[in-house]
Image (cartoon, helix red, strand yellow):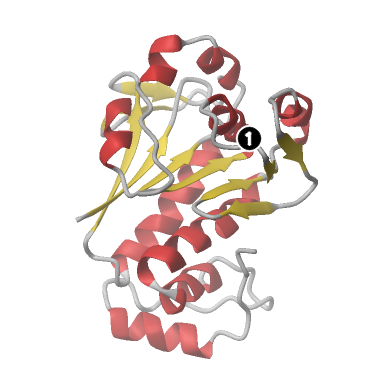
Amino acid sequence: MTQLSIVAFDRFTDIDVFMPWDLLFRAKAAGASDWTIKILGKSEYVTSVAGLRIPTHGRLEETATSDAVIFASGVGIADVLTDKAFLDALHLDEEKQLIGSMCAGAVILAEKGLLKGRRATTYPTYAKKLAEYEGVEVVDEAFVRNGRVATAGGCLAAQLLCGWITEELAGADLADAVIASILPVGQGCKAFSGWGDPAAAKAVAAAAPVRVAAE
């Protein structure tokens, strides 16, 4: 079993949890059948900045046994940074895991020492905060990868982050099929007829002329 975890907290940005959830589930349904995808939090429920209350599937300590971890974004980051119990519950190891962040989630990676001496991106309103961490070079890019650690800036950069994770764990064909399924019609969209059928997903990927590269 391969576990992929999305770490959320109160006042998270809705799309920064739900878009990764959707993209990873598409990959699971179309080929990565051994994946278990969970939303982890400090409590049984978390509430988004838009007021949507959702259940979590596990506690933060499960990051220790996750093969990939994505940190959500949102104005609730300010509370996370002052919550020692939250931060101490995160167990991350880039030698064994793929670790990524959406927008302001990069600040959590910096807080855990994962971005020192590295380039990183974030949402514009958090660039100054991220730059306060020693050795972090903040860049104006959608996606920045440093080995097995990556940061994504901007909500729609979720496709770059999840495309990278999917390619690393399940191959480029499946990653391409998933990303092609969400592109606008007339701009590379390919019907994702491969839900639950790896062969069909591969055929869709082979026909897709557009690939969003996670570079």
Foreground of the two, 143 or 58: 143
In the image, taking residue 138 as reference, residue 72 lies left or right, namely left
- In which quadrant is the C terminus drawn? bottom right
Q: Which residue is mark 1?
A: 116
- Occupied quadrant, residue 50: top right
- So how many labels did they put on this image? 1
Q: Position of residue 129 (x, y in %)?
A: 73, 23
Determine whether 6 is above or below 45 in the image.
Answer: below
Q: Residue at x 49, y 52 (%)?
A: 148
Determine whether 41 is above or below 24 in the image.
Answer: above
User: Three-letter amino acid code at disc 1?
Assistant: Lys
Label 1 element class: loop
Q: Position of residue 121 (x, y in %)?
A: 70, 43
Q: Position of residue 125 (x, y in %)?
A: 76, 29
Task: Check disc 1: other Cα within 10 Å, few if <14, some if 14-19, many if 20+.
Answer: some
Q: Residue at x 44, y 79 (%)?
A: 173
- In which quadrant is the N terminus drawn? bottom left
- Occupied quadrant, residue 57: top left
